[in-house]
Image (cartoon, grey):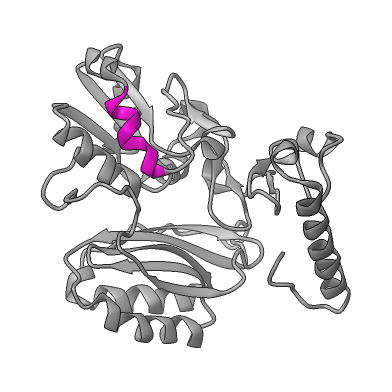
Amino acid sequence: MDTSTTFSPETEGTFCVAALYHFAAFPRFESFRAPLQDLCTENGIKGTLLIAHEGINGTVAGTDAAIARLLAFLRVQPEFAGLEHKESRASKMPFLRMKVRLKKEIVTMGVEDIDPNKVVGTYVSPQEWNELISDPDTLVIDTRNDYETAIGIFRGAVDPKTRTFREFPDWVRQNPGLHNKPKIAMYCTGGIRCEKATAFMKEQGFDEVYHLKGGILKYLEEIPQEESLWEGACFVFDERVSVTHGLKEGEHILCHACREPLERKDLQSRHFEEGVSCPHCYERRSDADRQRYRDRQQQIALAKKRGQRHLGS
């Protein structure tokens, strides 16, 4: 099923950004890397695609025609015939290069034998999500990491404050109180983390486990702001940094020293220096680190003067 969005010329950005994933048995993933890389390079597509024995995951950007070619190429593969994707727009190319990477997992949880094709939670559409998470018998859990939840979260959701998705299973095991509510509702950016998180929860003995189909991105695309229970912005893993309702580009910028999203108030901090430090990382970095970042920032500035884009930017 094609879940792409149609945009009017008035709101259309220069680039189409496609987020996609699909779990499937894919033993030939190693030999698929080269043709996939070649097709993306030939069509000017940039971003990252991860392929593994369990499927494909990634976000890429390009012209509408280029992204359409990529999706058509993927969907003629027997393993990815049912692949779905989500589209948004970017006013400038949000990636520097194209990478197709071979991985052990397309989303790294670090738990053996978790297979969303065998067991997974119940999908809930964006239109049904508000009712589910407003139910007092439902515990809502954000499966994303702390730097993502810091800029946006669903009203009333539990924030595990994990630094990586690998920490999520231990967080569940260390919180037996999660069993106190009969329903568990989980969400993430585009849906892929919840595929594994809900499968893990089912294996841990949770019965009624639900997850938001299409993730936050689909919810922000389809639910009007006046009806929304989402608060803040949604972190995205590209140079846009964040998106808001209607998948409009947010106002956050990225600290290129620690990769944390920054709000306008963070830029006023005495610890903020573009490309060098921010309030989140200043105390975690040494003077030597900051000098190294400062040297890199000077190279970025020189490249910009020459009309080039430095790969470290």
Q: Is residue 281 left or right of residue 209?
A: right
Q: Is residue 262 left or right of residue 294?
A: left
Q: Position of residue 199 (x, y in %)?
A: 20, 41
Q: Is residue 284 left or right of residue 53?
A: right
Residue 172 appears in which quarter of the rendering?
A: top left
Residue 97 visible within the image: yes
The C terminus lies in quadrant:
bottom right
Q: Is residue 274 magenta?
A: no
Residue 1 visible within the image: no
Residue 245 appears in which quarter of the rendering?
A: top right
Determine whether 103 is above or below 40 in the image: above
Q: Position of residue 110 (x, y in %)?
A: 30, 49
Of residues 170 and 237, which is closer to you in this image? Answer: 170
Name the residue at 23% across, 62% down: 54
Magenta span covers which residues?
Answer: 165-174
Name the residue at 86% across, 79% down: 306
Q: Position of residue 183 (x, y in %)?
A: 22, 21
- Looking at the magenta stretch, what is its main secondary structure? helix
The N terminus lies in quadrant:
bottom left
Q: Is residue 172 magenta?
A: yes
